[in-house]
Image: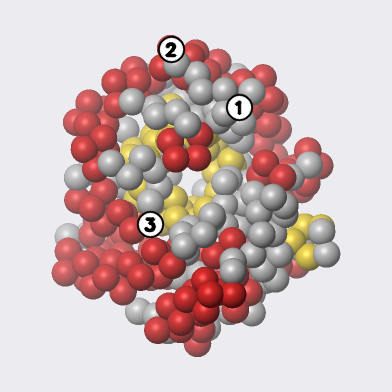
Amino acid sequence: MLTGSIVALVTPFRDGQIDETGLRRLLRMHLEHETDGIVPCGTTGEAVTLSHEEYERVIAITVEEVGGRIPVIAGAGTNDTAKTIAMSRYAQSAGVDGLLIVTPYYNRPTQRGLVAHYRAIAASTNLPIIMYNVPSRTGTNLLPETVAELAQVDQIVGIKEASGNLDQVSAIVHRCGDGFTVLSGDDSLTLPILAVGGKGVISVTANIAPREVARMVRAFREGNSAEARRLHNHLFPVSRALFVETNPGPVKAALALMGLISGEMRLPLVPPSDANLRLIRETIDQAGLLAGTEQAA
């Protein structure tokens, strides 16, 4: 269920508030453009800047708009286990299909602390949990042996791996086997991760190229490696441009250039510099994305 191209959805803002119209527009686009799943309120959704009420509203709108047609995997991770459990319980009550739980940031728990954290969350919910390892943002690396230990917990079904280390991804696949889902957390590495046993991606690039990302993953999983490689090469410069500054600044700027939402950010994040905005515009234009989301690769 939690495989394929899953979009790490941005949270659109307008005049300091959640742009509910823009959010619904994005969700409808993903339903129409082959996206396999939605992650609201993750890192790309600027979840740490949302109030409790805003978090609940984004989850509620997403569940309502998607209407059960594809899975909704709510971002619910914080650096406080008790708060993460509370958010997970709300998301479950709202009708989501799974949870994405990032490793605690800033307080940098040990591997034993990470095991205790994820076990406590799993004991509090019936939902499937995807762990999220992104050491560059959290300061903590969820090691393959720790992942293998946590994979024995019934509710913990997979990991979004954004360490940027293919050896680590390979070690997780080797230790955990085919029954555990490894998802790419780095768009530019999605095809290599698929090649070593990954089953999909939680994608920033899918915000602006949902159909192309979905078709790349599908092509590889159906054995059409030449088509998957073509789409990877098509999307590679786009994926790199979307990380020229801290995510989600570049992808929000791209969505604004495409006329889908405003590019508004919440402090301390700010929109890309003029030079990087030109790079983003040129890159997505060369990829055919400024022609509209109907443009295929």
Q: Mark 2–mark 3 contact, CB under 8 Å?
A: no
Residue located at (58% from left, 41% from top): 75
Which of pointers 2 and 3 lies earlier in the amino acid sequence? 2
Can residue 36 be seen at all in this image of the molecule? no
Which of pointers 3 and 1 lies earlier in the amino acid sequence? 1
The answer to which image quadrant residue 56 occupies is top right
Is 30 situated left or right of 169 in this image?
right
> Image height check: is 94 above or below 120?
below
Can residue 94 be seen at all in this image of the molecule? yes
The answer to which image quadrant residue 134 occupies is top left
> Image height check: is 182 above or below 282?
above
Label 3 to label 1, Cα distance in Å?
25 Å
Label 2 to label 3, Cα distance in Å?
29 Å
Q: Which residue is mark 3?
A: 187
> Image height check: is 237 above or below 135?
below
Q: Which disc is residue 79 wearing?
A: 1
Secondary structure found at label 3:
helix
**Residue 230 location (% of width, % of height):** 23, 72
Front-lying residue, 93 or 210: 210
Give the residue type at disc 3: Asp
Residue farthest to the bottom, as pictured: 291
**Residue 32 location (% of width, % of height):** 52, 70
Residue located at (62% from left, 51% from top): 45
Give the residue type at disc 2: Arg
